[in-house]
Amino acid sequence: MFIRFTFFLLFTIEAFFTWAQTDRNSNLQKNYQLKISKSASPIIIDGKVNEEAWRNADVADNFWMSYPIDDRRAEKEIQTEVRLTYDDQNVYISAICYGPNDYIVKSLKRDNQEFWDGDSFSLVFDPVNERTNGFSFSVNPSNVQYDALISGQTGRRGGGSNSGISSAWDNKWISEIRTYIDRWIVEIAIPFKTLRYKPSQTTWGLNFIRGEPRTNSYHTWSPVPVQFVGVDLGYTGALIWDNPPAASKSNISIIPYTLASTFKNIEDDEPAEYNFEVGVDAKIAVTSSLNLDLTVNPDFSQVEVDQQVTNLTTFSIRFPERRLFFLENSDLFSDFGIPPMRPFFSRRIGLDEDGNAIPIQYGLRLSGNLNNDLRIGLMNMQTKGIEQSPGNNYTSFALHRQLFKRSVIRGYFHNRQGSHDGELLSDNYNRTVGMEFNYISEEGKWRAFAGYGKSFTDHITSNKNFFYNFGVGYDTRNISLYTNLAGVGDNYYADLGFIPQQNHYDALNDTTYHLGFHHSYTRASYTYLMEGSSKVISHTWELNNVIDATTEDTEIFRFRFSGEYTILWQNTSRFVFELSRNVNTLLYPFDFTDEKPLPAGKYKYNTLGAMYQTDQRKLFSTEVGFEVGEFYNGKRAQYMLAFSYRKQPWGNFNLMFEQNNIKFPEAYGEISLFLIGPRVEINFSNQLSWTTFLQYNTQRDNFNINSRLQWRFQPMSDIFIVYTDNYTIDIWGPKNRALVLKANYWLNL
């Protein structure tokens, strides 16, 4: 009954708010317009930009500075000129990026994490022009590509809220580069099949971003205030089509794969397992703005391993989603709640808590725009049963309705249902349902949200099963204020979500208790921009406060108040200093040292820490940090050191070391935890790379080797050879070993 009511309520709201249509073309789009006309002759992507269509095209130039200042145009010597044209299959972009040819390119690997530390050119498309979701395509002087999905939740620059950028999304497009003494030239072709758009839409949101590392600056065509990232969809200009592109015909992509692997469980002395698998993914454009993704027997063995961390909290750590199937339009499902409390987290599907794969039999996902104001997401996945555990069927539905200029009202329904022999189990389920309203002012300074949800679980009473959240934020060039309050009841369960503070482990009884709690977070910061300085960019002072308290008796089990000072230099180096006051209450005994657990009770302690990062543009850079002080009823000293050496552009050699020395009173023991992570990346070309990542983690008693060779023999078509090895540390010896050979091919129909 409640499922039918939820769907009825969502669509009633969709009809009710139809009156809220407004003109979403801001003054910015009136002042920054670029007209695009169809090319009368073919465009050859060779970086020469010598076709007649380029000579006749409108020019976007005279870029604004966006960072580290935003009150002036970029200097003439490092300006950028951009032109667009199109034909029946592609939209074409050419850019001339002026500046000296001592380019900084940190890697030849696609979508590498350090892409933005070097020279770059990017464009942002918002095809629906609703400021809720868009696409970003970027390239550097070595023709390394970087593409991403952009949502309307990118937030403040450097504020830790840039979850609205999903760089793990990949699709097919081509680019070529030519370099000269005083400029480099970009030429790009993006198939209409790659984009999601409405055929009748005559105006798209558009912006261009130029990264210029020698001056540590970013420039944009349509001006973006310094406090926001350049891809912010609230500050796009307008792309005006002479005739809007027609819907792509037969827009279907088939991506089959074959895999051969061997696995040896050495620790348990089991015989080697040999495996051969085939599977397929498909992407079908139901309309130009609505996409259907299908997968049968998917495999994610080529996905990079998680970067391990030392966990000194009493709760689980959240690792990011990296699997391609879950990434397109992922914000539709995952942006509900607040960062530490999410009713949906796709890693709960097909992965256990340790990141080990649970076989997925099939999956489908329908996502995109039904019209200019309405986005939907519908997903269904089926996993296999393992040993005595049944399989699970997962269904998620989300609806986003655009209101006013940048605001959204949205709702969700998630369902996990146990299954056995193809039958769903009526007494094994978990369901969550909820709604949220997210307000963003037109210029992005004000943000506010509020939401409420419920969960329904077999054999769990339907009271104290609530989830609520609301908050408000305010951002200007100098001031950033944010506060939220959220909570869950004792009987709120989210099998498809991630709410770690709800589970409390009792080390004496080896039992985990599931408790409701209230959570509040407040941040206030002031940034002083050194606009007249040639060395310093800014000074920032920030205060943070976190409070978690049980819902039953409002007992505070986590309180943290911290003050932080950050200085940024023009040469990309930075320094951070932090003081914090902590009051933690262990509701149950907890063990940090594998000796006598700390007793339940209240612990008050202070910490002091600092971090310094050197110039990231140099071939050799370092990062060093420490945190010292009390820790519950003992002492802790943490030391961190990271080195990075770049042999431009083919090699990256990194080493990260972290040590935590914890000493409690004698009865509770002491421990030294080491985390060492060497990483070597060698790029033989833009298509062939070899990455080896070693992780030595004493907390997890594991030494892991992950080595991956990737050959991109065709656009988005790859051959992978992946080798993994795990060893115990305490009594050194091998645990397990695996070798995988996988090939996939992207076929457009």
Image (spheres, helix red, strand yellow):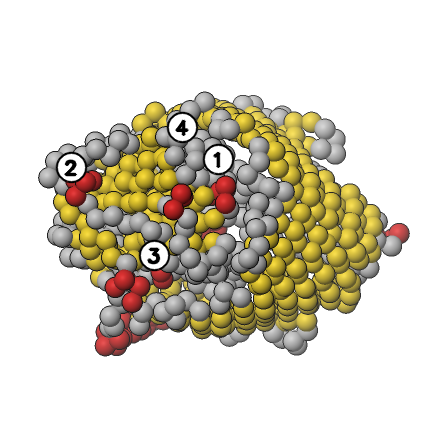
Q: Which residue is mark 3?
A: 222
In this view, the mark in front (1 or 2): 2
What is the three-letter code of the residue carrying label 1? Ile
In what element is the residue under mark 4? loop
Whole-percent x and y of residue 29?
A: 27, 62
Q: Is residue 18 visible?
A: yes
Residue 48 shown left or right of residue 741 in the figure: left
Q: Which residue is mark 4?
A: 686
Q: Which residue is mark 2?
A: 52
Q: Residues within 10 Å of mark 1 (few under 14, many from 20)?
A: many
Cβ atoms at labels 1 and 4 below 8 Å apart: no
Q: Which residue is mark 1?
A: 104
What is the three-letter code of the residue carrying label 4? Asn
Whole-angstrom CA distance, mark 3 to mark 1, is: 25 Å
In this view, the mark in front (1 or 4): 1
Whole-percent x and y of residue 626?
A: 73, 48
Asked if residue 546 is positioned above or below residue 300 in the image, the reply reads below
Residue drawn at (64%, 66%) of the image: 543
Asked if residue 175 is positioned above or below residue 341 in the image, the reply reads above
Cβ atoms at labels 1 and 2 below 8 Å apart: no
In what element is the residue under mark 3? loop
Whole-angstrom CA distance, mark 3 to mark 2, is: 26 Å
What is the three-letter code of the residue carrying label 2? Glu
Residue drawn at (39%, 68%) of the image: 443
**Residue 233, quarter of picture:** bottom left
Whole-angstrom CA distance, mark 4 to mark 3, is: 31 Å
